[in-house]
Image (cartoon, grey):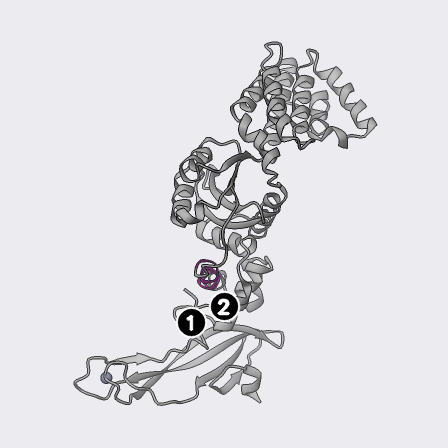
């Protein structure tokens, strides 16, 4: 009955120890079979036993430990150099890890697929954080990196920078680059830094044949990623991600609002300053403003923006958003060019002119969106998944931890392989 409950193949239960406020301890040994010396094949002698405590799945609502009475063998042949060794059984526990094999696979699913935190799962098992995290790396990396079919050919490839931690005393920002199949919304990999070096190396490693399938390359408005694509997929059409184009317009609007605020009042925005009160209405999409909201916005601008500078930049932002209202590929380029040139007007505030210069510099990539029809949806869906991973973990200190958590959650691993992979 005990063995049925424990449910491990070829294991006999020696006893169960239950002490108050401690995990349930189940003592087991492997069913004896004759072991031969790995070097000479002579039948080995059992020298002694070593007790190894392994974290196992909870049983009947209690954290549980498996106490494996591991046999130590010795080769009886005096001339054999092999000496002594300890029995292994990957069905019970992987080498080096302090938990049972089934606990390792369960952890990978709980954290990787369900998005639970390592701390929460460790608490449920009644063990420490590192035991769970080490298992997650061993099984997770096997699932993600040892499966050559996790992703196939990619038609629309995207690069995006992601902040994964603020490090040290000065909260220095550490960035990573995510490589995404934007067609289906699958995170392919995460590489450190936001320069071109790591993504170039990753893409080059995929080989010429794989790269030749990439027809569209989406990017934020960043120079390094543009040169990555120029180098690795020169024939692909580069597409500026609409989300980042609109984000830039909002950023310029914000800069303008803060500058005008400062020039007019000589201090940063406070609760009752009209421009400060307008800050959320300004970044909201025009069509999402109610009539009252728009009236309030115009009133606040009248009070806080005497030269109409914030208003002009707000208009520019709305025009940039207007780029994506239609899907006429032919009109798109002339629309971007006209907008970019109009914004060069010397009467406009410097923030609007700077926005115009960026639009002109990236005009082909911006207009290409209309032709490519690479939807923004999958990219944002991937971003949201990764944000969730970061929130659950309260940020990451280790890039390796971050990468595996992001890939398990947003990289669409083949979960049906989890039962059969060999942990690393
Ligand atoms: Zn031997």
**Is the residue marked by circle 2 packed among few (<14), some (14-19), or many (20+) residues within 10 Å?**
many
Q: Is residue 382 above or below residue 229?
A: below
Q: Cβ of disc 2 within 8 Å of ligand 1?
A: no
Q: What residue span does the magenta drawing correspond to?
A: 133-145
Is residue 251 shown in magenta? no
Label number found at residue 369: none
> Measuring 59% from the left and 44% from the top, which residue is drawn there?
379
Horizontal arrangement in the rendering, residue 120 relative to residue 97 (left or right): right
Q: Under tag 1, what secondary structure?
A: loop
Count of marks, rendered view: 2
| Visible residue check, residue 195 | no
Q: Position of residue 36 (x, y in %)?
A: 30, 86
Q: Position of residue 10 (x, y in %)?
A: 47, 85
Secondary structure mostly seen in the magenta stretch = helix
Quadrant position of residue 81: bottom left
3D distance between C-alphas at marks 2 and 1? 9 Å
* Residue underneath mark 1: 94
Q: Residue furthest top?
A: 347
Label number found at residue 104: 2
> Measuring 47% from the left and 40% from the top, which residue is drawn there?
175
> Measuring 59% from the left and 58% from the top, which residue is drawn there?
116
Q: Badges 2 and 1: C-beta atoms under 8 Å apart? A: yes
Instruction: State which quarter of the image contains the C terminus.
Output: bottom left
Of the image marks 2 and 1, the number of the one nearer the N terminus? 1
Figure quarter occupied by ligand 1? bottom left
Quadrant position of residue 227: top left
For the residue pair 100 and 108, the one nearer the viewer reads as 108
Q: Residue furthest right?
A: 292
| Visible residue check, residue 136 | yes
Q: Residue furthest left?
A: 79
């Amino acid at each position: 009955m005990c063995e049925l409950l424990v449910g491990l193949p070829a294991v006999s239960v020696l006893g169960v120890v239950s002490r108050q406020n401690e995990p349930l301890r189940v003592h087991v040994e492997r069913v004896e079979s004759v072991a031969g010396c790995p070097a000479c094949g002579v039948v080995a002698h059992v020298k002694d036993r070593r007790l190894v405590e392994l974290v196992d799945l909870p049983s009947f609502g209690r954290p549980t430990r498996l106490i494996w009475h591991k046999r130590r063998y010795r080769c009886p042949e005096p001339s054999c150099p092999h000496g002594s060794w300890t029995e292994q059984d990957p069905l019970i526990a992987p080498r080096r890890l302090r938990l049972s094999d089934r606990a390792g696979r369960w952890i990978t699913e709980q954290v990787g697929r369900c998005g639970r935190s390592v701390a929460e799962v460790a608490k449920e098992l009644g063990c420490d954080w590192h035991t769970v995290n080490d298992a997650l790396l061993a099984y997770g990396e096997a699932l993600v990196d040892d499966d050559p079919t996790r992703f196939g050919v990619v038609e629309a490839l995207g690069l995006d920078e992601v902040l994964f931690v603020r490090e040290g005393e000065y909260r220095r920002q550490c960035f990573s680059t995510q490589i995404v199949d934007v067609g289906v919304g699958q995170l392919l990999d995460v590489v450190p830094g936001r320069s071109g070096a790591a993504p170039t190396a990753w893409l080059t490693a995929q080989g010429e044949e794989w790269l030749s399938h990439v027809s569209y390359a989406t990017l934020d408005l960043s120079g390094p990623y543009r040169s990555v694509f120029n180098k690795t997929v020169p024939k692909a059409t580069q597409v500026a991600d609409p989300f980042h184009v609109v984000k830039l317009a909002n950023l310029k609007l914000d800069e303008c609002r803060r500058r005008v605020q400062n020039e007019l009042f000589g201090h940063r925005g406070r609760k009752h300053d009209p421009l400060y009160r307008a800050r959320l209405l300004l970044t909201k999409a025009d069509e999402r403003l109610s009539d009252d909201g728009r009236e309030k916005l115009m009133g606040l601008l009248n009070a806080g923006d005497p030269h109409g500078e914030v208003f002009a930049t707000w208009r520019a932002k709305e025009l940039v958003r207007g780029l994506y209202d239609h899907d006429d590929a032919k009109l798109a380029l002339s629309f971007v060019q006209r907008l970019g040139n109009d914004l060069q007007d010397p009467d406009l505030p410097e923030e609007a002119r700077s926005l115009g210069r960026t639009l002109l510099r990236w005009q082909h990539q911006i207009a290409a969106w209309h032709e490519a029809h690479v939807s923004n949806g999958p990219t944002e869906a991937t971003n949201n998944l990764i944000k969730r991973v970061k929130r659950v973990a309260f940020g990451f200190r280790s890039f390796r931890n971050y990468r595996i958590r992001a890939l398990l959650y947003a990289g669409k691993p083949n979960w049906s392989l989890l039962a059969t992979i060999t942990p690393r």
